[in-house]
Amino acid sequence: MAEPAQDLYELGRSALAEHRTADARALLVKAAARCPPDHLELSLRIRISLAWTVYDERGPDAALRSLSEARRTAHRAGLTHLAAAATVQIGTVHARSGDLGAAWRCLREVADDDLPAPDRMRMLLNRGTLASELRHFDDAVADLQSASLLARDLGESAIHFMARHNLGWVQFLRGDLPAALRHMHDAESLHPLLDLSVSRQDRARVLLEAGLADDAHRLLLLARDGQPTAQRRAEVDIDLARCALLLGRADDARERARAAAAVFRRRNQAGWHRRAALVGLLARPRLGAARRLWADAREAGDRGVALRAAAAGLMAPNPGGADRTDLTAYAAQLTRSPTVSLRLAGLLALAAAAEDAAVARRFLRRASSTLVRAQLGLASLDLRTATALHGEAAAALDIELAADLGPDALVETTERWRMATRPSPQVRPPTDPRLAEAASTLRKLRAEFDPAAPDAPTVAASIAGAEHEVRALTWGAPRAQPPLPGIMSAGALRRAARSAGATIVVTVRRGDHIDAVLLGEGPTHTVHLGSAAALIELVEAVHADLTVRARLGPAHPLAATVRSSLNARLHQLGQAVAAPLADRSGPLVIVPTRALTGVPWLALPHLAGRPVTVSPTASSWATGARTVSDPTAEVLTGPALELAAEEARAVSTAWNASAADALPSALAAADLVHVAAHGEHRGDNPLFSSLLLDGGPVFAHELEGLPMRASHVVLSACEVGRATQRPGDQPLGFTATLLCAGVVCVVAPVAPVDDALAAQVMAAYHEKLRTGVDAATALALATAGDPAAGAFTCFGAPWRVAL
């Protein structure tokens, strides 16, 4: 009879390891029923394991009572190893209940030698995980590495996975996002046969810290799906609420947090209830509620919640002018957190509560520096731009305060927050063979994909999987911290503009309004361009008309209608964003905000024939100019482009250019690279924007870290000049990737252009460029006379040939 009970017990433990709580309970209850009375050790083991299911069903108090009784029985019987096992489980229950201090005290009582290898393995896993939560990082790494090795030796794949995954969690808590994502991805590559909901939730938390809120949201929904208990669903709901908060959906965040808090209240889960209440408070800060939560968390020793509650109290309206000195002192501790989002939250709270604007701006300068340093420490451009999401509120407050000080302060403030978009070339680390394999697989799948084929849905799913693998591997790439780039003062920018005979137009979003600060000849002043929402809608409408015009031949019955619609919308857009600049002559340098991404500046009738450069920052334009003597040039073409060969011949004639085999080698070898090919901008996944070359597609993410000699790149490819602007005006796309990698100037269209027109414009462009004029002037001359040609845009900084 004991053998069936033993077998059922082992099956029950396996079910627990795989998070199949209901199955585990059924198996363990059967094991208890079949266990002979004289098999005390097995009976105690079953009771200890059953306590976990009791926790999920009836809460921590019932589970702790059961475990305490089991521990007393084990002590009386002299079964030291089982008393230790019960102590481990008691500590785990305390941890799940949010009482980390009690949990840590329990597990520190346990000597490794008191447990057999399988139990020691689990104890090391739990103790290491708990040590990480309590910031005992060295202890955590030691325990988790020991657990991982022991699990591997024992053939316990589930524990091996969890230990490896939790090592990633330790790196997250240390503030090393790439290492965290790398370890978690490596753990997933073990393909454990268990429920991944907990690991998915952990990974989603790391993605949230990285600012990848949409990715985190998708992962959290997977983690929540099929959760068997209200407890686990509520735990995931807290993170879904945090995700909604980061995405600006405060009402959704408050509703989810409220529902989760109700679950924890019913289950007497004080620690979890505080966490849910905190998210609700962050969604709508109220001083009284913040003080109550702060006091409650302090009394319970819940430092993390106490610090965030204090910060929320500083963010709350305070019409009565209540003294918040105590909250200020507490919230200031957040500014020393290893977690970037918490440091930023602390600095924002201190700035919001400061009575003196100068003091507030000092905190906000620290916030921008904190964010930019964190961004520049990330090798992945995807992560670098996404992380800006955590600085959006601080940037908005900083800009509002700067606006009160005048246009110079406004320009310098926006330059600080956009600093991470400055060119930041790096040496690519040794290639991860998994990344090379995933990129090769993706290229093959994309090249062979036929949307009309019967297997199209299956292949599309494989493409999505390959893209996920590539992103995950690039996120984990290491990078040495580069020096913080400097920004130029408004006065220095003004002098640079005057020296070039240009006007710098720095656009800024304040609420729903878009303003532009003009620097150059004449007084620096600010002009209003319009509503952000209206401009976004108008830019999209213009893009749609340009797209339709490029796809319809001139003989098409609708061609005249489309042309008329396009001209009307271009005039309307020009009235909003170009007419206010009419009093300034000479070239324009546009530093766009998110609402103006994709504007075809040269297509606007107000700017026809006028040189325009679009630059991520004014400082990068002013400091990045390049003059090249006797440039070497290489040309690449793609398939299914009727006039590609003719366009390539025109470029070759202008520069004595040679044909290149591949884009990476061309970028490393030539000063000027011209690509005539079909292209695609992926708004949903900008780093998978691509050029379709004869050798297959080349994706934007493949350009990161490449050796880069090319200082000027011309992309005669549909809409690859477009960018997806993330918070903080962080552009992401094919052109933005080239600029960030160190290319000085890129010419590319922000909308599709008819193939014949593109070939004509490109031939004229290179003919003008070789005369010694700068790229923006050459493009303005080449596109004058046809609004559709104005989709071509000059990005970056001035580039010219020395004669």
Image (tube, rainbow, N blue to C red):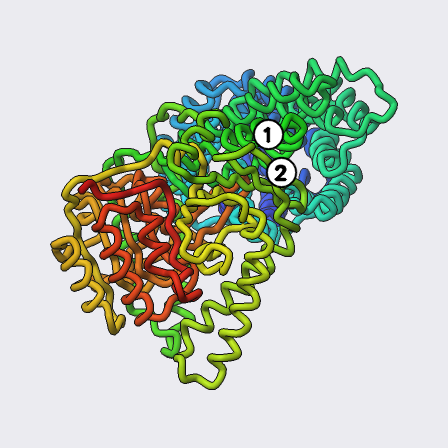
**In front here: 145 or 255?**
255
Report the amino acid beneath label 1.
Thr
Classify 41 as above or below 589: above
Q: Secondary structure at mark 1?
A: helix
In the image, residue 309 lies at what x, y percent? 72, 26
Q: Residue at x 33, y 61 (%)?
A: 717
Q: Residue at x 74, y 24 (%)?
A: 314
Residue 665 visible, this orientation:
yes
> What residue does disc 2 label?
52
Nearest-to-viewer mark from 2 and 1: 1
> What residue does disc 1 label?
92
Q: Residue at x 59, y 45 (%)?
A: 28
Q: Secondary structure at mark 2?
A: helix
Classify 54 as above or below 636: above
Classify 253 as above or below 127: below
**Mark toward the start of the polypeptide (2 vs 1):** 2
Report the amino acid beneath label 2.
Trp
In the image, residue 538 lies at what x, y percent? 58, 60
